[in-house]
């Protein structure tokens, strides 16, 4: 294979020809690769754990958990089966039934993963929360999801949960992962309970449409929504693991996301396990040197991370190929925010391979548009739809959808509804859910365009689009151009209401440390962006800012910048970092 920017070397990908593969792809055929339950149902935990524990990869490491001090613990598929069965038996003992919800609020420790998969075995719904949520965001989620059981640590219980108990009438049991004995009839020691039950459990005969996972969106555009997913979603996890992340037997995979965000569950738990590879879990937060040493020491083959993390690594400029042996690494993927041209190119320069962008949402449950190991990477593009997914660009007028077919026409990104991991509800928001669908199309809320070769290009969120002097301006285009200026480390743009031109494009800029926040720099950036973008689209106002407000999952909160600029209420800030 050619080793140029664009083609990933060293192994024959599971999907070696995108077009040929798409033309013969069928979900039904892929479904046959899954095991299914003896009584005919399907269960995520069975596909991810038990079927491997009963096969010749039973002794393969399923989870390698790296502690904060960088020592590690291995859990094989056989062992994971026993531990998750024990957890399922604990839930049985607590009389948790199919459809009840089990939440977690812990750091990335093995019991979180055991709880997630053990819950799925019982047919109950699992909802992982990010451990840094304070009382209010935790309350919102626990009450909306009617949590019956919460798995947490003593410290987080004391700090975050205890004060909420009066307001959570549904919450029956709190399981403390680190307590040596039970506290009272509500707060129990998980390890004591785990020791009282057996490690034999018959997985409930869950059906494809039975609810399995509840994930809250990132809250970038407003109040986080609770998206409900079903057991059949495992088919998307299997297919994307195999053909996007290109899992091969023996692979070691590391997804850096926390299970509190959908990426950290779909890809930090399910996809690698369903495909029988080894899943790395790091207990610690971002640290450039640590991350490179993990890639080296654990011989990571496929690495899935985010543009925010990539930008932080770029700023450190540690030249990893000179200091670390990263020869096992063959594929890097990124999701969550637009991946800029500069970042893809940096990947090539730094790791010897371009970083593959992919696009999806909490609502889609899995990767929908992606760059692939066998396909030319076009820096700045999200890639092409997953085989089995029909995407389109269209305009929405009332109840009517008009598909746009000319190359590079900008419009709403649409997906033909009905893929396996499509969300089945927004919790308690039936009307809102219905509004996401028009006819056979799901409206993603994002704007994009498609080029003549079928590559998709992200334009922005429909809510963030700026209408200025008759132009529709997507933040991505302007922010990318600004970031090419040497002084700009990060940028976010908003539209400010303006009587003359509708909205005025304003940029918030974080400077590289060696540049002065003065008028000269401002003028220089303005001139640079005018030359690149033209005067109609280039920012008319620039403000320097120390850091951009972001969600805990690393997304720029443009709505907050706008509210602050206009002196309006800040709205929901539960996911603000
Ligand atoms: P909320 O729906 O609560 O406002 P959110 O949309 O940020 O929050 P997520 O479901 O976590 O919540 O994020 C999905 C969104 O992230 C997408 O709709 C898109 O706007 C953005 N996104 C994800 N991947 C990419 C990508 N590769 N390029 C550009 N944008 C992306
Ligand atoms: Mg969204």
Image: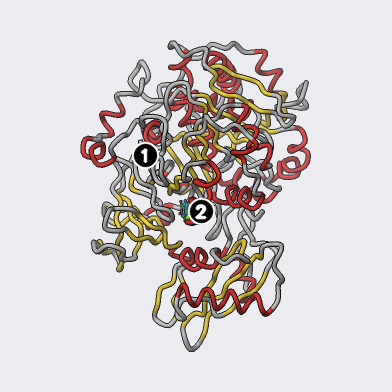
- Please determine whether, in this image, residue 28 is positioned above or below residue 396: above
Determine whether the residue tagged by mark 2 lies in a helix, strand or loop: loop
* Residue indicated by mark 2: 337
Residue 23, image x and y in percent?
21, 39
Toward the viewer: 28 or 198? 28
Residue 196, placed above or below residue 313: above
Percent position (x, y) of residue 310?
57, 48
Q: Is mark 2 within 8 Å of ligand 1?
A: yes
Asked whether 213 or 18 is in front, the reply is 18
Q: Nearer the viewer, mark 2 or mark 1?
A: 1
Q: Mark number for residue 2?
A: 1
Q: Secondary structure at mark 1?
A: loop
Q: Give the crowd class for mark 1: few <14, some 14-19, many >=20 residues within 10 Å.
A: few
Q: Are circles 2 and 1 on residues that touch, CB within 8 Å?
A: no
Q: CA distance from mark 2 to mark 1?
A: 28 Å
Q: Does the Cβ of the disc 1 residue fall within 8 Å of ligand 1? A: no
Describe the colour scheme in one phrase.
secondary structure
- The residue depicted at 29 percent of the width and 40 percent of the height is 18
Location of the N terminus (image quadrant):
top left
Residue under the point 58% across and 72% down: 507
Q: Is residue 133 left or right of residue 373?
A: right
Q: On the picture, is 405 further left or further right than 447? A: left
């Amino acid at each position: 294979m050619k080793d140029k920017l664009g083609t990933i070397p060293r192994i024959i990908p599971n999907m070696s020809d995108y077009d040929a593969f798409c033309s013969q792809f069928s979900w039904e055929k892929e479904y046959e690769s899954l095991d299914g339950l003896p009584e005919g149902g399907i269960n995520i935990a069975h596909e991810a754990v038990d079927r491997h524990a009963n096969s010749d990869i039973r002794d393969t490491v399923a989870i390698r958990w790296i502690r904060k001090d960088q020592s590690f613990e291995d859990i094989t598929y056989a062992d994971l089966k026993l531990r998750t069965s024990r957890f399922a038996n604990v839930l049985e003992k607590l009389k948790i039934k199919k459809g009840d919800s089990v939440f977690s609020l812990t750091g990335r420790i093995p019991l979180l993963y055991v709880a997630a998969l053990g819950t799925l075995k019982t047919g109950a719904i699992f909802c992982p929360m990010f451990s840094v949520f304070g009382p209010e965001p935790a309350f919102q989620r626990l009450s909306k999801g009617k949590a019956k059981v919460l798995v947490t640590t003593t410290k987080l219980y004391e700090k975050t949960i205890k004060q909420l108990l009066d307001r959570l009438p549904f919450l029956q049991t709190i399981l403390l992962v680190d307590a040596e004995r039970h506290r009272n009839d509500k707060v129990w020691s998980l390890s004591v309970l785990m020791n009282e039950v057996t490690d034999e459990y018959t997985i409930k005969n869950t059906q494809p449409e039975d609810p399995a996972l509840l994930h809250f969106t990132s809250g970038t555009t407003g109040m986080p929504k609770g998206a409900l997913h079903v057991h059949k979603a495992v088919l998307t996890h299997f297919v994307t693991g195999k053909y996007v992340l290109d899992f091969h037997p023996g692979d070691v995979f590391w997804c850096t996301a926390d299970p509190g965000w959908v990426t950290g569950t779909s890809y930090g738990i399910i996809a690698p396990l369903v495909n029988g590879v080894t899943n790395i879990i790091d207990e610690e937060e971002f640290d450039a040197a640590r991350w490179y040493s993990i890639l080296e020491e654990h011989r990571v083959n496929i690495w899935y991370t985010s543009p925010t993390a990539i930008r932080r690594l770029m700023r450190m400029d540690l030249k990893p190929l000179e200091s670390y042996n990263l020869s096992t690494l063959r594929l890097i993927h990124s999701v969550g925010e637009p991946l800029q041209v500069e970042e893809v190119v940096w990947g090539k320069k730094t790791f010897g391979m371009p970083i593959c962008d992919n696009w999806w949402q909490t609502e889609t449950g899995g990767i929908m548009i992606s760059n692939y190991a066998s396909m030319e990477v076009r820096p700045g593009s999200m890639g092409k739809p997953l085989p089995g997914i029909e995407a389109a660009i269209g305009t929405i007028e009332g109840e009517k959808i008009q598909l746009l077919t000319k190359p590079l026409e900008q419009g709403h990104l649409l997906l033909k509804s009905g893929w396996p991991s499509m969300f089945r509800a927004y919790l308690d928001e039936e009307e809102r859910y219905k509004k996401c669908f028009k006819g056979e199309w799901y409206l993603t809320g994002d704007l994009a365009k498609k080029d003549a070769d079928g590559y998709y290009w992200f334009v922005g969120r429909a809510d963030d689009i700026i209408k200025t002097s008759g132009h529709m301006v997507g933040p991505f285009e302007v922010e990318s151009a600004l970031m090419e200026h040497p002084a700009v480390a990060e940028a976010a743009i908003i539209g400010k209401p303006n009587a003359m031109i509708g909205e005025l494009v304003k940029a918030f800029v974080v400077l590289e440390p060696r540049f002065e926040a003065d008028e000269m720099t401002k003028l220089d950036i303005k001139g640079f962006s005018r030359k690149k973008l033209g005067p109609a689209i280039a920012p008319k106002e620039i403000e320097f800012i120390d850091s951009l407000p972001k969600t805990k999952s690393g997304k720029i909160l443009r709505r907050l910048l706008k509210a602050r600029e206009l002196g309006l209420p800040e709205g929901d800030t539960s996911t603000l970092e």
